[in-house]
């Protein structure tokens, strides 16, 4: 069955929902395709403190407000997985797993990015049994436990601070001796009781049915130290999702979609917004900015 829209948006994170709001308000018929749930990665944030208009709001609440507004404006939510696309013609075609084909004259790709794995052989074995990529989702399971958080950016520090509410000990492990985090987050880190271990990586994870210990390797000296832990939270960056979507669209060597300042890709009628776009800063506020620009440009393209 084919369903026609003016604009199809792939992904319902902050960029996709914002694009849906702006495009719908411009009088366009809009479908937002989302494979899981609206909000994307922001739903894993316990508190968002840097989004204008809210001194503090949970990621779930913020995303729900965005979704409600998009639907109120007229955007249609389609919860399904994109299986194939054809964006070369004037009519862009998106096939979803139900078998339906959605068509539109413009597409905005807002597929986002996923958590990057540490890449050791034992990692997958312990996913859900001690290895986690979402502190908000799983932090409460580690009450009075020992936990390691891996990473050196704002996300890693925020995850470590959050888990201190539950765990008896939190250790932040970073492979370098300098952090990428902002001064505000670093001040919070050094004012906490979190143990900081720099110049180290997790070399291996051990345990039977759940994590019991890890080996930490000093990247400068090669020294390996075994540490008893109950959980490992990974926060070392992202990899773009939807690399199988719109294969005709130009991407960089990391898989992020290349676009100009108007969010226009190299394919006419195909725009991009949010974390999947090649850029330096990935925050909620930059995602919604991308979404607003992409939808406005898509509307102009259609007109």
Image (cartoon, rainbow, N blue to C red):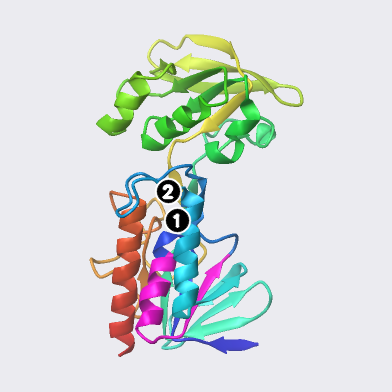
Is residue 285 at all visible to an observer of this figure?
yes
Quadrant of the image containing the C terminus: bottom left
Residue highlighted by disc 1: 62
What's the residue at 37%, 14% (across, down)?
220
Query: At which x and y percent is residue 174?
Result: 41, 24
Horizontal side, residue 301 vs residue 238: left or right: left
212, above or below 302, in the image: above
Residue 168 lies, in percent from the top left, at 57, 17
First to last magenta residue range: 16-34
Q: Check disc 1: other Cα within 10 Å, few if <14, some if 14-19, many if 20+.
A: many
Question: Which residue is farthest right?
Answer: 209
* In the image, residue 130 above or below residue 42: above
- Quadrant where the image shows the N terminus: bottom right
**SS of the residue under disc 2:** loop
Residue 71 percent across, percent down from the top left: 50, 74
Determine if the magenta segment contains residue 23.
yes
Q: Nearer the viewer, residue 254 or 302?
A: 302
Q: Nearer the viewer, residue 29 or 218?
A: 29
Label 1 residue SS: helix
Question: What's the residue at 47%, 33% (across, down)?
Answer: 159
Q: Establish if 246 lies above or below 43.
A: below
Residue placed at 44% from the left, 45% from the top? 238
First in residue order: circle 1 vs circle 2: 2
Dot label at residue 120: none
Mark 2: few/some/many CA within 10 Å (<14, 14-19, 20+): some
Do residues under tags 1 and 2 come within 8 Å of each other at their CB atoms? yes
Q: Quadrant of residue 122?
A: top right
To which residue does mark 2 refer? 57
């Amino acid at each position: 069955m084919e369903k026609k829209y003016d604009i199809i948006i792939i992904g319902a994170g902050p960029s996709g929902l914002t694009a849906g709001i702006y495009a719908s308000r411009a009088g366009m018929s809009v479908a937002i395709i989302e494979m899981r749930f609206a909000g994307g990665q922001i739903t894993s944030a316990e508190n968002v403190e840097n989004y204008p208009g809210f001194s503090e709001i949970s990621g779930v609440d913020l995303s729900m407000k965005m979704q409600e507004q998009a639907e109120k404006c007229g955007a249609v939510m389609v919860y399904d997985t994109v299986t194939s696309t054809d964006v070369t013609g004037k009519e862009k075609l998106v096939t979803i797993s139900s078998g339906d084909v959605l068509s539109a004259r413009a597409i905005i790709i807002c597929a986002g990015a996923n958590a990057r794995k540490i890449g050791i052989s034992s990692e997958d074995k312990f996913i859900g049994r001690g290895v986690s990529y979402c502190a908000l989702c799983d932090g409460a399971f580690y009450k009075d436990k020992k936990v390691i958080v891996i990473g050196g950016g704002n996300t890693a520090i925020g995850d470590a601070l959050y888990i201190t509410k539950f765990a008896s000990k939190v250790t932040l492990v970073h492979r370098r001796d300098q952090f990428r985090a902002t001064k505000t987050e670093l001040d919070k880190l050094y004012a906490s009781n979190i143990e900081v271990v720099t110049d180290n990586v997790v070399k291996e994870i051990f345990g039977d049915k759940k994590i019991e210990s890890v080996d930490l390797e000093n990247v400068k000296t090669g020294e390996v130290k075994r540490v008893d832990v109950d959980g490992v939270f990974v926060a070392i960056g992202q990899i773009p999702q939807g690399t199988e979507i719109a294969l005709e669209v130009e991407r960089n060597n990391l898989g992020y979609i290349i676009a100009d300042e108007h969010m226009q890709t190299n394919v006419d009628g195909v725009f991009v917004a949010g974390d999947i776009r090649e850029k330096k800063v990935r925050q909620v506020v930059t995602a919604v900015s991308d979404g607003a620009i992409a939808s406005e440009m898509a509307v102009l393209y259609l007109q």
